[in-house]
Image: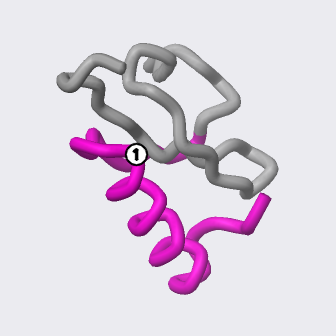
Amino acid sequence: MDSTQTWHIVKHNTGNCKIVPSEQVRDDDTEIIEKWGPFASQEEAIARRIGLIRAGKCQPV
C-alpha cells in the first residue's frame, strides 16, 4: 500500500458512513451528503467513524 494514501469518511443518503480511499471520493457524487477527512491512515478514519456514530451523525453499517 502506498504510504501517502489518505482516507475519507463519506455519509450516504441512507445515513450509513463508509471509509473509502480519497481517490474514490468524487465531489459530484449525489449519494454523498457529507464527508470528513482526509485522514492519514485507515485506522485514524475508523476511530473517527466510531466517534461520528457515537455522536449520532452516522448510522453503523
Asked which quadrant contains residue 56, the reply is: bottom right
Give me the residue at 44% from left, 19% from top. Answer: 27
Is 60 on the left-hand or right-hand side of 2? Answer: right
Q: Residue at x 60, y 35 (%)?
A: 32
Residue 10: x and y, percent? Answer: 54, 43
40 vs 60, left or right, is: left
In-front residue for pair 1/41: 1
Q: Is residue 12 above or below residue 15?
A: above
Residue depicted at x 52% and y 14%: 28
Question: Tag 1: Cα neighbours inside 10 Å, few (<14), some, or many (≥20)?
Answer: some
Quarter of the image that includes the C terminus? bottom right
Residue designated by label 1: 42
> What SS does tag 1 mark?
helix
* Farthest-out residue, front: 1
Q: Which residues are magenta?
A: 33-61
Give percent across and percent down for residue 13.
74, 45
